[in-house]
Each structure stands twice: as structure tokens, then as C-alpha cells.
Image (cartoon, grey):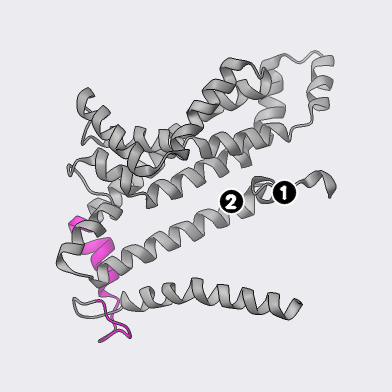
Amino acid sequence: MKTLSTLFMGLAAIVVLLPIVVVSAAALNGGRSMLFPPQDPTLSRFAEFFLTEPVWRTAMFHSAIIAIGSAALAVLIAWPLAYGLWKKGGKASKVLAGLGAMPFALPPIVFGVGLGFFWGFSGGLGAIWSGIVSHAVLFLALPLVTISIGLQSIDRAHLDAAATMGATEKVIFRTIILPQMVPYTASGFFFALVLSFNEFIVMFFVSSSAYSTVTLQIFNSLRNGFTPTMAVAAITFILVSIAVFSLVARFGDLPRLMGADQSKS
């Protein structure tokens, strides 16, 4: 049984890694065609993506601004919702938390079309700030979940002890709750950031061709065929995802975030 498990995990690793190896090698092509194995290997496509091609540099800038801005906004919105639900647990808090998580459960095409109409009527279609707000709403569920998990992990006996010693709610929040919530808040931020960085469908509708993120620029470049520069963009997505999830695993409570019951440990 152990041998079968090892073989299965090895096969799964090959299935995951093989496309990455192919794409990484295709980024080294010296010509304009994405070939494997690469012909005339060179690193010039990486310089083209990050330095010399304004189109890709601008798209990368837009992706970074939207990802960071939307993740930060999602955290700012999620905090009062999660805190109110944990602190009071009233119907209003539950309704707001449910509404906050709903966009993530909708099919992206449905949410994207709806946002396209909304921003079209309100005058925000094609603006960077509307893209930030759209992704913040779309990925609000991620920091909402991580922050809620973090709040539920706080031992209320510590809060009762602080209150018995005369600490006010503000002092309790600043000295007990907030320090324990830093890893969970950061995890929610990074989860939202990496998904925003990789998202295409919603951004396709709300950008209205006024600007391009890296995902949109890859789509636009398909008109000229598959190029090695597109492979560099794909590698960038992979590296960003690995870096972000490594940070979450290193500094966040990953077992609890993944749903593990630590009460039995």
C-alpha cells in the first residue's frame, strides 16, 4: 500500500512538473516561436519582458498595482466583517459576511459580466481603481475566512483575564487580539494578492481594453501566435505563486488555514 502511495505521488509530481519544465524551456527560445526543445537558447526574452518591452512592463505594473491594491482593500473590508461576526454573531454580521463571500462562489463569467454593466452605468469602466475594487470584492472571501479562523483560535480566557485586570476593549484589541491576528491577516492578504495577479475573466470585462494586465496581455499576444515572451509571463506567475504560498506556509498557521483540527494534536 505504501509503494502504491509513493508511485501515485511520484506520478502526480511528474504531471505537475512536466508542463512547468516545458514552459520554462520554451522561454529560452532565441526566435519568435515557442518551440520545445528550445532553439538558440538565450535569456533575452526575460530582459524583453522585464526591461525592454514597454507593453509587458506596463502590463506587469498594472498587475502589481491591482493585485496589491485589491488585496489590501479586501483585508480592510474583511476585518470589520469578521470581527463583528466573532464578537457579536448577530444576524446583521452573518448577512454581511455571507454577502462578502458570495462573489467568490459565483462563476467568474457571471460576476464579470455583472461588473461590466455596473461600471459601465456608473462611469468606472476601464479605470484602474474599478479593477482594484472589482478584485477586492471578488476575493473578499479569502481574508474573511483566514481572519475568521484566526479570531476563532484566540483563547477567550485571555480576554476575560485582561478584562478582569481592568483592560478596556481597545487595550485588549491592541495588546492581545491584534498581535495574534497578524499571521492570519497576512495570509488572507497574500491569498487575495496571488489570485488577483493570476485572474483574467473579471479583468477582461472591467478593463474594457483601456489597460492590460499580464494575463490580458498574454491573451492579446495570442493574435501573433505563441511567443517565448508569453512563457516568461507564465514563469513569472509560477514564481510569484511559489513565493507567496511559501511565505504563508512559513509565517501563517497553514494547518489551521487548510482546515486541520488542531484540538486533537
- Report the side of 256 relative to 79 (left or right): right
Name the secondary structure under disc 1.
Answer: loop
Determine the residue positioned at 43% across, 72% down. Answer: 20
The relative height of residue 101 versus residue 183 in the rendered view (above or below) is above
Horizontal side of residue 237 vs 100, given as left or right: left
Instruction: Tell me if mark 1 has few (under 14), some (14-19) or many (20+) residues whose alpha carbon lies within 10 angstroms of its own.
Output: few
Residue occupied by mark 2: 248
Q: CA distance from mark 2 to mark 1?
A: 15 Å
Mark sitting earlier along the chain (2/1): 2
User: Is residue 30 placed above or below 209 in the rendered structure?
Assistant: below
Q: Residue at x 25, y 62 (%)?
A: 51
| Marker disc for residue 260 | 1
Q: The residue tagged with tag 2: helix, strand or loop?
A: helix
Q: Which residues are magenta?
A: 34-56
Q: Amino acid at mark 2?
A: Val
Residue 239 within the segment the image draws in magenta = no
